[in-house]
Amino acid sequence: MSIILVGGSPGTGKTKVAKILGSKLSVEVISLGEFADESGCITVEDKARKTGIINEDCLVDALLKLTEDKSKRIVIEGHYIDLVPSSSVQWVFILRTHPEKLRARLSERSYSNEKVTENVEAEVMGVCQMDALDAFGEAEVFEIDTTELSAPQTAEKIDMMLKNKSSPTRIDWMSQLEEQGRLDEFLTD
Ligand SMILES: Nc1ncnc2c1ncn2[C@@H]1O[C@H](COP(=O)(O)OP(=O)(O)O)[C@@H](O)[C@H]1O
Ligand SMILES: [Mg+2]
């Protein structure tokens, strides 16, 4: 089993990019949200936020079964990739999008202002990046700045990286925005 993970904050293009990558590589793509739902791991409805709550233990069990069953390469995308058993993970790609662009993109979705702000802050702070680094380690986590890339271009970039392992790059919006004196635009206190 060799899993390629595609993670990132909501709106960074995980679902779209993973689909394109999956067809490029002719491998199955699993969306973790759907997988959690199908595995009966989304329990209580959080009505205020219009989302289900994921039972993490349940999802970890379901993922262990999945990785035991499958002998081939698959792409897994979603927001809980750090729950995938790291022994089966070969590659981790974290999609990053400049907070300004991400905010514009999320505002186009039916997200509340609160949810937009929350997700933009998480991207500024690099929450998905940190979770991935904790779970899989420095050497395994590749970040991609998708700000100026289309989804097909991002998938192409991943495909190139799979063929030609480079050293992992780190993206730090927090320092960039701080240097530009723009942090206040993106963080509430
Ligand atoms: N360069 C881009 N890469 C990925 N998605 C993009 C891009 N530009 C615009 N989008 C749009 O951003 C939205 C978020 O994409 P999606 O794949 O659903 O993200 P995620 O799964 O990370 O939440 C989609 O509507 C997609 O069409
Ligand atoms: Mg998605």
Image (spheres, grey):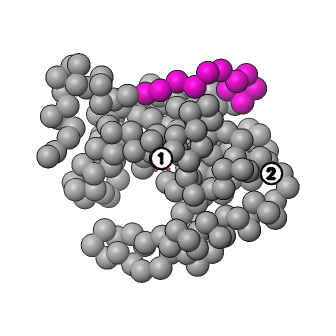
Q: In this picture, is 129 found above or below 15?
A: above
Side (left or right) of 127 relative to 87:
left
Image quadrant assignment for residue 50: bottom left
- x, y (%) of residue 169? 52, 24
Indicate the secondary structure of the residue bearing disc 1.
helix
Side (left or right) of 7 relative to 85:
left
- x, y (%) of residue 178? 22, 25
Side (left or right) of 162 relative to 119:
right
Give the crowd class for mark 1: few <14, some 14-19, many >=20 residues within 10 Å.
some
Of badges 1 and 2, the one in the foreground is: 1
Q: Earlier in the sequence, mark 1 or mark 2?
A: 2
Q: Which residue is mark 1?
A: 131
For the point 43% across and 27% down, the residue is 171
- x, y (%) of residue 80? 52, 56
Q: Which mark is residue 41?
A: none
Q: Is residue 164 magenta?
A: yes
- 73 or 61, nearer to the observer: 61
Question: Magenta segment, which residues?
Answer: 160-171
Residue furthest right in the image:
71
For the point 58% across and 74% down, the residue is 58
Say whether residue 37 is visible: no
Q: Main secondary structure of the magenta part?
A: loop
Q: Which mark is residue 1?
A: 2
Counting every numbered tag in the picture gives 2
For the point 18% across and 27% down, the residue is 182
Disc 1 within 8 angstroms of ligand 1 (CB):
no
Give the crowd class for mark 2: few <14, some 14-19, many >=20 residues within 10 Å.
some
